[in-house]
């Protein structure tokens, strides 16, 4: 089931919602390897850092409520990687499965292509995170590898699935 949402640039006022959405994944899944959820101030610092690099940080909003977010970050800091970006997408847990991830990732890809990016990489925590893997595959990402047992959380090891998409022409 898909939903109509407004996709727009994230702002400082979105920070509490970003923190709340992300906290769910920190507490319940291997989608992120953080152990303590950052507060709104830290989420806004991260958002500002992304914006300062000229990269997109988007939110999905329904009826005035932020229900998801996505952003692109530099894949690696060295200059040779400057045309490769990494995506991150998080959806409010009670809104999952409604097409919001696809809306956000579609917009994010378009914005990154407009910036001249040539590759996008997804590093998905936990190979059991099938929804995220399928989302990326539906949008043209291909699996390029798995990093076995690279994250320790909830007293067990998690892997990371690597997917990649060529951008632009």
Image: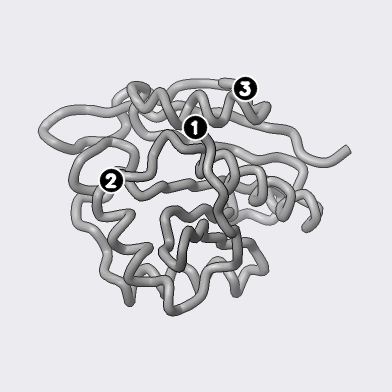
Q: In which quarter of the image is the C terminus?
A: top right
Residue drawn at 27 percent across, 28 percent down: 158
Residue that protrudes farthest toward the right in the picture? 169
Q: Residues within 10 Å of mark 2 (few under 14, many from 20)?
A: many
Q: Nearer the viewer, residue 15 or 148?
A: 15
Please tell me whether mark 2 or mark 3 is closer to you in this view: 2
For the residues marked 2 and 1, what is the alpha-carbon distance in whole angstroms?
22 Å
Q: Nearer the viewer, residue 150 or 22?
A: 22
Q: Where is residue 99 in the image (x, y as percent from the top left)?
A: 52, 38
Mark 1 touches mark 3? (CB < 8 Å): no
Q: Where is residue 147 in the image (x, y as percent from the top left)?
A: 41, 25
Image height of 99 relative to 59, above or below: above
Q: How crowded is mark 1: few (under 14 residues within 10 Å), some or many (20 or more)?
A: few
Element assignment for label 3: strand
Please tell me whether mark 1 or mark 3 is closer to you in this view: 1
Q: Which of the labelled discs sits on residue 40, or is there none? A: none
Q: Residue 52, located in which quarter of the rendered image? A: bottom right
Q: Is residue 107 left or right of residue 40?
A: right
Q: Position of residue 146 (x, y in %)?
A: 45, 22
Q: Which of the labelled discs sits on residue 25, or is there none? A: 2
Mark 2 touches mark 1? (CB < 8 Å): no
Residue drawn at 31 percent across, 44 percent down: 93
Element assignment for label 1: loop
N-term-proximal mark, 1 vs 3: 1
Please tell me whether mark 2 or mark 1 is closer to you in this view: 1
Q: Residue 148, located in which quarter of the rendered image? A: top left
For the residues marked 2 and 3, what is the alpha-carbon distance in whole angstroms?
24 Å
Q: Where is residue 151 in the image (x, y as percent from the top left)?
A: 28, 35
Q: Which of the labelled discs sits on residue 142, or is there none? A: 3
Residue occupied by mark 1? 1
């Amino acid at each position: 089931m898909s939903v109509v949402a407004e996709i727009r640039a994230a702002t400082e006022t979105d920070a509490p919602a970003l923190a709340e959405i992300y906290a769910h994944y920190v507490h319940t899944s291997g989608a992120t390897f953080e152990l303590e959820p950052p507060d709104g101030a830290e989420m806004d610092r991260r958002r500002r850092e992304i914006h300062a690099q000229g990269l997109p940080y988007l939110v999905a909003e329904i009826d005035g409520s932020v229900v998801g977010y996505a952003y692109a970050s530099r894949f690696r800091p060295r200059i040779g990687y400057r045309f490769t970006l990494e995506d991150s997408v998080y959806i409010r847990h009670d809104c999952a499965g409604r097409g919001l991830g696809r809306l956000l990732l579609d917009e994010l890809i378009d914005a990154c292509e407009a910036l001249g990016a040539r590759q996008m990489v997804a590093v998905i925590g936990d190979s059991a995170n099938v929804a995220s893997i399928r989302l990326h595959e539906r949008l043209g990402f291909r699996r390029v590898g798995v990093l076995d047992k690279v994250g320790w959380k909830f007293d067990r090891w998690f892997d990371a699935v690597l997917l990649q998409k060529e951008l632009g022409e």
